[in-house]
Image: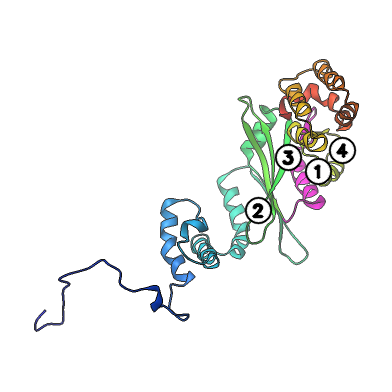
Amino acid sequence: MEGGNYWTVQKFKEDYSCTIDDLHNCHRQASAWLAGEILSPKLVVSDRSLKPNEIMDDKQVTKTLRVKGLVEQNIFGLPDLSYQLLHAYCHELKRANHGIVTTIKKDADKKFEYLFIAFNASLVGFQTAISLAICIDATHLKGRFGGVIFIAACEDANNQVFPLAYGWGDAECEDSWTWFLKELKKAIGCPTNCIIISDRSPAIKVAMTKEYPEIPDDLCGFHMNMNLKNKFKSHVLYNLFHDSFKGTSTNRVLGKDLQRIIGLQEVTHYKYIIHSRQLQSSASSSSQYLL
């Protein structure tokens, strides 16, 4: 404006006239830190995870991954600090949930190793109204420090998954499974007529022998069916075995279905199934939970 320190835009053209030839190797670009600061508020509002391809628009993948990491760091903090808050987290859980069971185990260097959590509502429900068939499994984490999440679950009267307990560990090995089952035994004891269903990995076998030698460790029908499919490459056997367990409630019915497998002239299949943890003896009490 005339006589002043202000000016106004009279005309604006949206056409971009600069070409890529004007750029050079030292051309200044937005850093991953700046992009992370800009995208953090959007992620908080949308309440969802951020994928690299949602950020990337003719940008390097490495920078995109750095941006993603910085966005998550700005929102959730450093993973190292999260582990330092575990004791405070468990304290708040106990303060808000009466009767909850929480246990943290550290290694020789006083660093986090295992965590076990079981809510009181789950423990009471298991003792009063939940079927005594416990399914245990673990899944791997993809964070900076890796590790696994352990889970123990049952089935309620509505045929819905009923979480019983869960925990964290460094790896799915004999020591971690033994510790998890030991804490689970402290929380629920050793109920009579109880069975534990798993994929029967070598680590679980050893842990069950140490902590629950008196409870049958049965093989999950889904895992067994996949093992049959991978071992014998037979879709006919896969479908036949699946149908034999769908709705099976007695040894007599299961025996007839296994005889049909023998009718395929595949005695090896029959021996493999029978060898898998005395399948017939467990079918009468747990077949409805195996698939």
- Which residue shows up at 65% across the image and 32% down it? 125
Label 1 near label 2: C-beta < 8 Å?
no
Residue 136: assigned label: 3
Residue drawn at point x = 55 percent, y = 46 percent: 96
Q: What residue span does the magenta drawing correspond to? A: 170-197
| On-image quarter of the N terminus | bottom left
Taking the view exactly as shown, the residue that stands out farthest to the bottom is 3
Q: How far apart are the alpha carbons under marks 2 and 1?
A: 18 Å
Magenta region includes residue 79? no
Report the number of numbered marks: 4
Residue identifier under label 4: 213
Q: Which mark is first along the chain, 1 or 2?
A: 2
User: Is there CB contact under 8 Å for labels 4 and 1?
Assistant: no
Residue 176 counted in the magenta span:
yes
The mark that comes first in sequence, 4 or 3, is 3
Residue labelled with disc 2: 141
Residue designated by label 1: 201
Label 4: few (<14), some (14–19) or many (≥20) C-alpha neighbours in 10 Å: few
Q: Nearer the viewer, mark 4 or mark 3?
A: 3
Q: Nearer the viewer, mark 4 or mark 1?
A: 1
User: Mark 2 near mark 4, Cβ–Cβ under 8 Å?
Assistant: no
Q: Marks 3 and 2: CB-CB under 8 Å?
A: no
User: Residue at the location (52% across, 58% down)?
Assistant: 52
Instruction: Name the residue rendered at 63%, 33% in the picture.
Output: 161
Task: Give the residue type at disc 4.
Answer: Pro
For residue 217, which quarter of the picture?
top right
Residue 104 point in image, percent of width and height:
70, 54
Mark before the other along the chain sequence, 3 or 1: 3
Q: Secondary structure at mark 1?
A: loop
**107 lies left or right of 89:** right
Instruction: Tell me: 56 left or right of 224.
Output: left
